[in-house]
Amino acid sequence: MAREHLIKPLVGHSYPVISHGKGVYLYDKAGKRYIDGSSGAITAGIGHGVPEIIAAMTKQAEQVAFVYRSQFTSEAAENLARKLADLAPGDMNWTFFVNSGTEATETAMKLAIQHYQEKGKKGKQKILSRWMSYHGITIGALSMSGHPLRRQRFVPLLEDYPSVSPPYCYRCPFHSSYPSCGVACAHELERVIEKVGADHIAAFIAEPIIGAAGGAITPPDGYYEQIRSICDAHDILFIADEVMTGLGRTGAMFAMEHWGVQPDIVALGKGMTAGYTPMAATMASDRVMEPIINGSRSVMSGHTFSANPLSAAVSLAVLEYIEKHGLVQEAAQKGAYLLEKLQSIQQNSHIIADVRGKGLLLGMELYSIPSARLLQIAADKGLLLYPAVAGRSGRDETALLIAPPLTITKDEMDELLEILQESILELEAEYIA
Ligand code: PLP
């Protein structure tokens, strides 16, 4: 092994070195071109090398790149918080800036606990969540995550928060089918709350569409309406983890809008800066903030780089770009086209179990075949995709996410589909030999 210093996901593995990116394409130093079919980790939502974002970044860097949030605020951070409040439905008027999706969900957790502390309900400390979920990698965020692979090494340190079944219709945990199931997976939350005791629970957290831990598992209509009313009935806050789904990806600015359900706290990340710089956010409603504003006035969280002006300027430019180019509507239309094509690929395939998702957050589940092999074949052919866990055990990566930048063109989608189709045929030949 050559002397190396960078700890990569797989130490010693030889990763291609990327030299540059343009639009939906990435180019490595050997001259190979890749179509970014998953926007990296569902992040590069407007594609690579967009001049408007680079200009906004440069302008802010020339003014000031960093101020410490306990000493100063910046126009960029103030304007971004206002913009997010304008975009978010309801009274989601407050934003706390952090640097990663993990920090956003962890802050959401702390905010929910603090909300009840300020109201004198100090016993409400637990956060409920679902099996097949991913909310981040720190001990707190991992405690909320029902992702066995990512939990396993740290189980003694983790809280057992995941306790509710996912709305996984393809493999219904209740061996039923929609709508005759009566959305049993949502009603299970009520039974868990009764068992744990509402006096001990601050919040229930869920990804509107389950990403890495499910391969775009999309709940049926009525699911979130039930979740909302169960949370209300037991005085429990509802946190929507929109780190992957937020800001246009699913064909709505916030994915919860698909079901017309208003969360109390929202976590954002990934597409917020489209990957140009790191930034994430926790948004809270007036109702959540009121006891804090009238109480200690300070949210007990924060990081050195919170509300970084450079990232805030980038995020503002990204949001303006999304609006100017109508990318939320485009995500809905392009997603419908891709989903239809994926369904016809599925009909002619022996290895695809299910395709699902909304907008440009689409998933494909294979019949007990590791998706890593498909990802490898596709990458060799110049298409990048993202692995996801699926299956009843929730342990095996047999699914994948297809989530290209919202800016992808029709020709580029057809190119993506063609490479995917070829890759599936090749994998089929390996398994059905
Ligand atoms: N929440 C969701 C839904 C995610 O998909 C992710 C990352 O994949 C996270 C939280 C954690 O975000 P980050 O990797 O930026 O810490």
Image (spheres, rainbow, N blue to C red):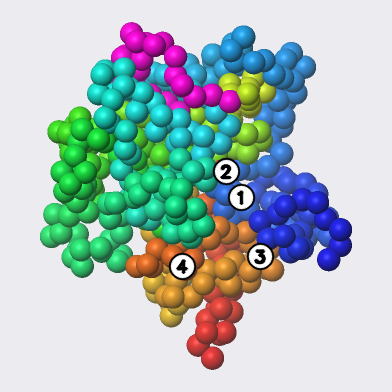
Q: Tell me the amino acid under the disc marked 3.
A: Ala
Quadrant assignment, res 373: bottom right
Total numbered labels placed on residues in the image: 4
Left-right relation of 218 to 274: left
Residue under the image location 28 percent in, 61 percent down = 169
Q: Tell me where residue 166 appears, x and y as whole percent.
A: 30, 54
Query: Residue at label 4?
Result: 396
Q: CA distance from mark 1 to mark 3?
A: 12 Å
Q: Is ligand 1 closer than 8 angstroms to the Cβ of mark 3?
A: no
Residue 40 is marked as: 1
Q: Tell me the amino acid under the disc marked 1.
A: Gly
Q: Is ligand 1 closer than 8 angstroms to the Cβ of mark 4?
A: no
Q: CA distance from mark 1 to mark 4?
A: 21 Å
Q: Secondary structure at mark 3?
A: helix
The magenta-colored residue range is: 282-303
N-term mark: 3 or 4:
3
Q: Secondary structure at mark 4?
A: strand
Farthest right residue in view: 3
Tell me if label 1 and label 2 are in contact, CB under 8 Å: yes
Query: Residue at label 2?
Result: 43
N-term mark: 1 or 3:
1
Dot 2 alpha-carbon crowd within 10 angstroms: few under 14, some 14 to 19, many 20 or more = many
Taking the magenta stretch, the answer to whether it contains residue 101 is no
N-term mark: 1 or 4:
1
Classify 262 as above or below 156: above
Q: Secondary structure at mark 2?
A: loop
Classify 40 as above or below 50: below
N-term mark: 4 or 2:
2
Confirm whether residue 391 shows in the render. Answer: yes
Left-right relation of 323 to 40: left
Query: Residue at label 3?
Result: 379
Quadrant assignment, res 98: top right
